[in-house]
């Protein structure tokens, strides 16, 4: 599989962090805060910082360009060109072929409704795929194909749990099931793509929201099956709305463009984000980087009231 790491050069550091949004719409303040943290983690440890558009699923016209504009407006920089998952399909297929050759995949003809209604596997974690199609006979497979049922491709996992080490949270043991590698429509699944991409791009540090922590054992287990190195993980606290739910665009003026319409500059927004991390008054990423210390990172989510951002602060 062509996932050997590119040799280090002046343009391509030996190790990198990354930010990998889905271009499905404008980034909100929670996304921007996570991007800022990913940048700080990478730059403070001498790593490169890469951007990747995870555009295998939902894509909104113009969203990627606006996302890049917003990141640049905050003062974040990145190394090299932006990568696009849609241009990396041969890498994913090569990984699937390798797993299939090792007998580690099988076709799954279950619909989403059937999976939701199925009982969890007797010895599997709660909510795991119950293995309905795991041991179909050749006759049963042909029968389902003849019925015109699309087949996803699943991993034949040999474990039900896997342990990862998180830079902030320590050891975390989470569920592993027969995760989807390729969807019924032929699209590579997120859990496969992100593992292949990180290894191929030389990304050895993954900083992202802690809502993605439960998927990390699956990804780490898959990486070991492919013989790929595991990155250093750091799952950071989310931004929540005033009701304690994960921040979303429906929560009001929560994008950079929304804030600009209210008279706030990108420097003001960055200052507010820095303040939420305990660094009052920082108005540039480089200024924040000089003060950034991992041990001082807040451990609790940031509850954000969009209407309160205009309150007086030590910000321009």
Image (cartoon, rainbow, N blue to C red):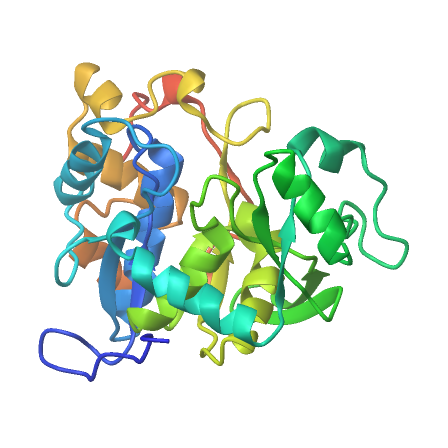
Dividing the picture into quadrants, the one containing residue 15 is bottom left
Instruction: Looking at the picture, tell me which residue is in the foreground, 18 or 200.
Output: 200
Q: Is residue 62 left or right of residue 140?
A: left
Residue at image location 39% in from the left, 61% down from the top: 92
Locate the C terminus by quadrant: top left
Examine the rendering and report whether any part of residue 294 can be seen: no
Residue in front for this viewpoint, 36 or 25: 25
| Image coords of residue 253 (percent x, y) | 33, 18
Tell me what residue is drawn at x 73 percent, y 37 percent.
115
Figure quadrant of residue 271: top left
Q: Which is more toward the observer, 145 or 282?
A: 145
Decide: is 56 above or below 27. below
Please indicate whether residue 310 sits to the left or right of residue 183 in the image: left
Question: Where's residue 110, x and y in %?
Answer: 69, 39
Can the viewer see residue 161?
yes
Identity of the residue furthest to the left in this view: 10
Residue 55 spot, x, y in % from top left: 32, 42
Query: On the picture, is 200 further left or further right than 129?
Result: left
In the image, residue 247 above or below residue 52: above
Q: Nearer the viewer, residue 308 or 65?
A: 65
Q: Is residue 167 above or below residue 268?
A: below
Position of the N terminus, as image quadrant, is bottom left
């Amino acid at each position: 599989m062509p996932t050997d790491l590119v040799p280090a050069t002046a343009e391509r550091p030996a190790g990198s962090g990354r930010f990998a949004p889905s271009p499905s719409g404008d980034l909100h303040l929670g996304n921007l805060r996570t991007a800022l943290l990913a940048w700080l983690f990478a730059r403070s440890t001498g790593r490169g910082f890469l951007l990747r558009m995870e555009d295998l699923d939902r894509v909104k016209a113009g969203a990627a360009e606006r996302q890049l504009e917003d990141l640049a407006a905050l003062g974040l920089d990145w190394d090299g060109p932006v990568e696009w998952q849609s241009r990396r399909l041969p890498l994913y297929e090569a990984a699937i072929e390798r797993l299939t050759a090792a007998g580690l995949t099988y076709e799954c003809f279950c619909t989403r409704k059937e999976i939701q209604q199925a009982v969890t596997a007797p010895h599997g974690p709660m909510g795991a795929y119950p293995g309905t199609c795991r041991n179909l006979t050749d006759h049963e497979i042909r029968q389902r194909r003849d019925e015109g049922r699309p087949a996803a491709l699943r991993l034949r996992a040999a474990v039900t749990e896997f342990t990862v080490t998180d830079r902030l949270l320590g050891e975390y043991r989470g569920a592993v099931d027969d995760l989807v590698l390729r969807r019924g429509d032929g699209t590579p699944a997120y859990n496969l793509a992100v593992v292949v991409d990180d290894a191929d791009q030389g990304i050895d540090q993954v900083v992202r929201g802690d809502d993605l922590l439960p998927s990390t054992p699956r990804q780490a287990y898959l990486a070991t099956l492919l013989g790929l190195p595991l990155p250093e993980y750091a799952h950071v606290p989310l931004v929540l709305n005033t009701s304690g739910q994960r921040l979303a665009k429906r929560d009001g003026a929560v994008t950079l463009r929304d804030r600009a319409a209210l008279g706030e500059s990108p420097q003001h927004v960055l200052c507010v984000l820095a303040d939420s991390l305990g660094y009052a008054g920082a108005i540039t990423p480089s200024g924040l980087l000089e003060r950034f210390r991992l041990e001082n990172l807040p451990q609790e989510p940031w509850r954000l009231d969009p209407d309160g951002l205009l309150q007086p602060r030590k910000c321009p």
